[in-house]
Amino acid sequence: MNPPTLYEQLGGEEKLRGIVDRFYDLMSELPETKTIRALHPSDLTESRNKLFKFLSGFFGGPSLYIEEYGHPRLRARHLPFPIGENERDQWLLCMNRALDELVDNPLLVSQLKMTFFRTADHMRNRAD
């Protein structure tokens, strides 16, 4: 039997949707994340849906993003946006806080934070 996926460990669709929604709520609420908030459209509906769909497949759940948009090509899709350490850290602040608030398993939170750091750091396309 295979071990549970991160998607399953998180609690599936409902829990993942909650994390994504909290992430974007924090991005809009926190004054220290205004730089990355400005990189997003005023209406975050599409951003929320795309991140949810991406993370669903990324964490071993349904491959919703790939089914709708094809290969994520994360770095290529983020190249038009200036992403340095500051932007990376603002993004991580929102995601880490959402995880701390909504995920009860400390080991899972730690694993997710490491995964998100590596991915966010790979998105950097400019030096600070």
Image (spheres, grey):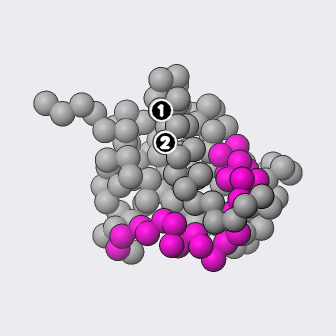
Q: Which region is colored magenta?
A: 70-94
Residue located beneath label 2 in the image: 115
- Where residue 8 appears, as percent x and y from the top left, is 34, 38
Q: Mark 2 and 1 residues: CB-CB less than 8 Å, in contact?
A: yes
Residue toward you, 109 or 64: 109
Q: x and y percent of residue 71 in the render?
A: 36, 70
In the drawing, does residue 42 fall left or right of residue 120?
Answer: right
- One can see residue 43 in this view: no
Q: Position of residue 113 (x, y in %)?
A: 55, 37
User: Can you identify the residue that label 1 sits on?
Assistant: 111
Give the structural element (helix, strand or loop) at label 2: helix
The quadrant of the rendering that contains the N terminus is: top left
Q: Residues within 10 Å of mark 2 (few under 14, many from 20)?
A: few
Q: How many marks?
A: 2
Measure the alpha-carbon separation of dots 2 and 1.
6 Å
Q: Residue at x 64, y 66 (%)?
A: 125
Q: Is residue 88 visible?
A: yes
Kindly identify the residue that appears in the image at 51 percent across and 66 percent down.
Answer: 75
Q: Residue furthest front?
A: 127
| In this picture, residue 112 sits left or right of residue 89 | left
Query: Where residue 106 appears, x then y in whole percent?
Result: 52, 22
In the picture, measured across the screen, residue 61 lies left or right of residue 39, that is left
User: Vertically, is 69 above or below 85?
Assistant: below
